[in-house]
Amino acid sequence: MKSARGRTAIVLWLALIIACLIIISRSQFTADLSAFLPKTPTPAQQLLLEQIRDGLASRLILVGIEGADASSRAALSRQMAQRLRVDPVFVSVNNGEPVSVERDRAYLFNNRYLLSPQVTPARFSISGLHDALADSIDLLASPAGLLVKSLLPRDPTGEMVQLLDQLNSGSRPEMIDGAWASKDGSRALMLVQTRASGSDTDAQQHAMTAIRQAFNEAHVAAAKLVMTGPGVFSVTSRNTIQSQVTRLSLISITLIAALLLLVYRSVTALVLSFLPVISGALAGIAAVSISFGSVHGITLGFGTALIGEAVDYSIYLFVQSEQDQQRWITRFWPTIRLGVLTSIFGFASLLLSGFPGLAQLGLYSIAGLITAALVTRFVLLHLLPANFRIHDVSHIGQVLFRLVAHAAKLRLAAVLLLLVACVILTLHRNNLWNDKISSLSPVSPADVALDAALRADMGAPDVRYIVVVSGASQESVLQSAEQVSRILQTQVDRGEIAGFESPSRYLPSNAAQRARQNSLPDPAVLATRLSMAAQGLPVHAQMFKPFLSDVEAARRQPLLQTADLEKTSMAMAVDALLIRQTDHWSALLPLTAPAGRDINADRIRTALSALSGVLLEDMKAESDNLYSGYLHEIIQLSLGGLLAIIGLLLLVFRSALRVLRIIAPLAAAVITVTAGLAMFGQQLIILHLVGLLLVVAIGSNYALFFDRADHPGIAVHQAAISPRTLASMLFANLTAVAGFGLLAFSKVSILQAMGVTVAPGVILALIYSAIFARKTP
Amino acid sequence: MMTRILFARLCILIALMLSPAISRAAEWDIEQLMQSLAQIRTDHASFVEKKTIAMLDKPVESSGELLYIAPDHLEKRTFKPKPESMTVDGDTLLIERGRQKHRLQLQDYPELAAFIDSIRGTLAGERRALERHYTLSLAGTAAHWTLQLLPVDEKMQSVVKRIRIEGAENALHSIEITQRDGDSSLMRIEKLAAP
């Protein structure tokens, strides 16, 4: 009967393991910041998120070539660009070579009467034409005359000059030997746009490999390749996290294994004790993969650390059971079950978080801990060999027993320490939390510095303010973008902003194009007006025959569509600035700040206030708000989790005093650790909070074991906590410290945050539990 | 007989007298001109420019000031007939006409770049920069020299036929540009006190 149930449990367990392995083999692993961005954003956040995940900026890779000499760097740049331009992985490869200049100019020139905002009925009246001609003649005599002379017969109103002007408004890198170079001339520069979005980390890695290959094939030994950009960050972060997680988990497994071997002196026991851990880890990853579609690197890092907690269950079983497993089930399992439930209640609060990254951690913990506990209880018990025994640890237990007996003497000292901790927290209350989203970034400061340097070289400052126009169709957002552009132009004239971009500049709305076509008079009328307009000017109207035929062609030409931009550099701009979302369209108009000062957002907002569906977004404030909003959310959720735990304990014990005694050491540990972090200048991020939750989850086992000792239902001779239980808690504590403590040495800030919180936290939780345990009579 | 001998001696004498002058003229070469031009760090001058353009019925005259600051800042401020200015700084050309501002990257306009470099290169005394685009030839003396620049590049040849710069010592007096299509401009320059 018993063995039949055991067999069923083992079969079910094996099936679960196989299922998990299949799921995991098909899982995707990511490491970008987007996992720490909300899953139910506001429309403005949605836009920000899409920009971060898929926007043009996310698809740019900045490439720098350093070392060697200037001319070989430039040659290398041209050689690489030539190779990369034929690679379908890349949409565009720009290093200053004039690959699209001809096509850009042809697009602007051939479509100048549909593109130029100057084309109005007034401009094609007699006086309008006269003024435009006079202006063009002046320009002809000016230094730029050389450029416009050949255009004059076809473009006497100077539309092309206007259009070129708009196109050239942005600053660009210097040219050295036919390729872009940094201002100080020390590196050659290239700007590459990938076809895949920045959030597709695999594709970004593929693109980086292609760039590196192109570089290597040139065989310039002295040259060095550097790359940066959001996609590059994702790839390097993923690699860093993966290599750290691999290394840390190897070390922590070795440490825990060594520790257990020392305690058990039995290889069988060691192998068996890892079964619940492995099962828990696999179930955790599989559950996250199914629910979220992909697994974040941080979840894996966290998973490593959770080994330290999952291994506790088998430690409790082996150390506490004294070969009588049935007695363990009746005596200890209820307490452990309650400990598991407490942990789940704590982690369930993470599931409610709007941060997919945190929800992943929550789900991973819950699935992992339940699996580990159940495998220990229902599978491990049946796998134990008949004569299974571990090394006798009662002597350690005896030592601990004597120590614990005196622990209560430390109560006063502990209370004082707590008071000091409270004072420290009060003093630091204003800068306890770091509410900058960058605090979560796994990117190293050196990489951030390189990114800033290359961006500065490229003359591409980070865009902070963007006017966002939303509408139901491409046409409607382009029309709004044109309205916004007119208002922004007045702001440019006033010096409030240095400039702005708009997709309508390269692809005007159909309405605007049609209006411009309608502004163009028919050939006969235009010819008459032109000859009258030329009076008093040093030109003959006959010279402008090509102009008449160009205008006539423009009147009849089909309106410009997105496809007409193909193969021009403007296609990239329109692609980036005109965005189709599921059911609506958005146009982005990024603003450039005037040199040396910030944009006064309120003034721009006021100027735009009359338009509907138009918003000025401050990307920096938006992303920081987003994060601090979630930080506050998670603080509340954690408090909710704490209340849920208290509720659960009240329900089980029906004694407020008992619950208080269980909660008190955990609260004390949390307060002390937080104060310690504040004292050492660590500002708390979300992951510290997750660490504190873990302290409560792991610590609750200790507090419950200490509490169990005076459970009224237990016979008098068992009233005091047994030496074996104490020993099991010490081992469990050491494994938890080994698992999480290693994270404290991680270079990735979010892993490090968990490590420095959990390792001291669990030690303190154990000590406080011992100190505050009710004295045995 | 006597007179013939006398004449011959006279010729030798004149030749001997002239020879230092001849040898000095031969020493006056492009290298020297460039060296003396390179010594000028800032240059401020007024100009009068007359442009003859076939498309226009009559020549256009303009006047204003020139400012050069070594090595690569060149400013041409026109006051008449309409105020406008052209500033070249490194690779950027800024043209301001009334409220309009045109900012061009010279790298996008190689002909214009070569054209501007002819003037800037001369002012800076950078022979190598000049010889990248032009074949140079020098005539005259240090007191009155003429530097002629003929474009090397075919594309440039289709725009500019010849640039002639006249000057004395290290001061430029005039710049004459003859374009392939016959249009031409002549700019007369007079040095002003440093600003």
Image (cartoon, coloured by chain):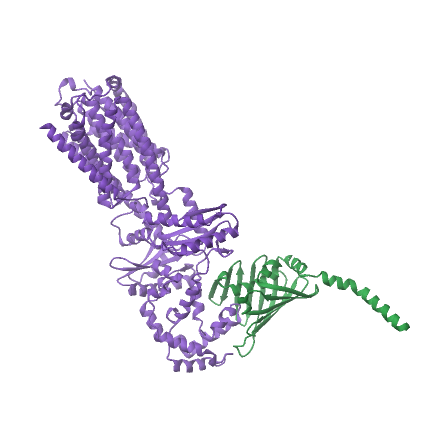
Left or right, A633 with reference to B52: left
Q: Which residue: 48% across, 62% down?
A: B108
Q: Is residue A504 above or below residue A555?
A: above
One can see residue A418 in this view: no
Q: Quadrant of residue A716?
A: top left
Q: Position of residue B79 (x, y in %)?
A: 55, 69
Q: Colour of chain B?
A: green
Residue that appears at 56% across and 59% down: B73
- Which residue does the image show at 46% across and 61% down from the upper left? A98
The relative height of residue A538 versus residue A3 in the rendered view (above or below) is below
Judging by colour alone, the chain drawn in purple in this rendered image is A
Compared to A261, does A172 lie above or below?
A: below
Query: Which residue does the image show at 43% across and 69% down from the upper left?
Result: A160
* A540 or A106: nearer the viewer: A106
**Relative vertical location of residue A262 with respect to residue B52 in this rendering, above or below:** above
Q: How many marks?
A: 0
Rendering coords of residue A577 (x, y %):
34, 59
A711 left or right, relative to A511: left
Residue A712 in the image, given as x and y percentages of width and height: 13, 23
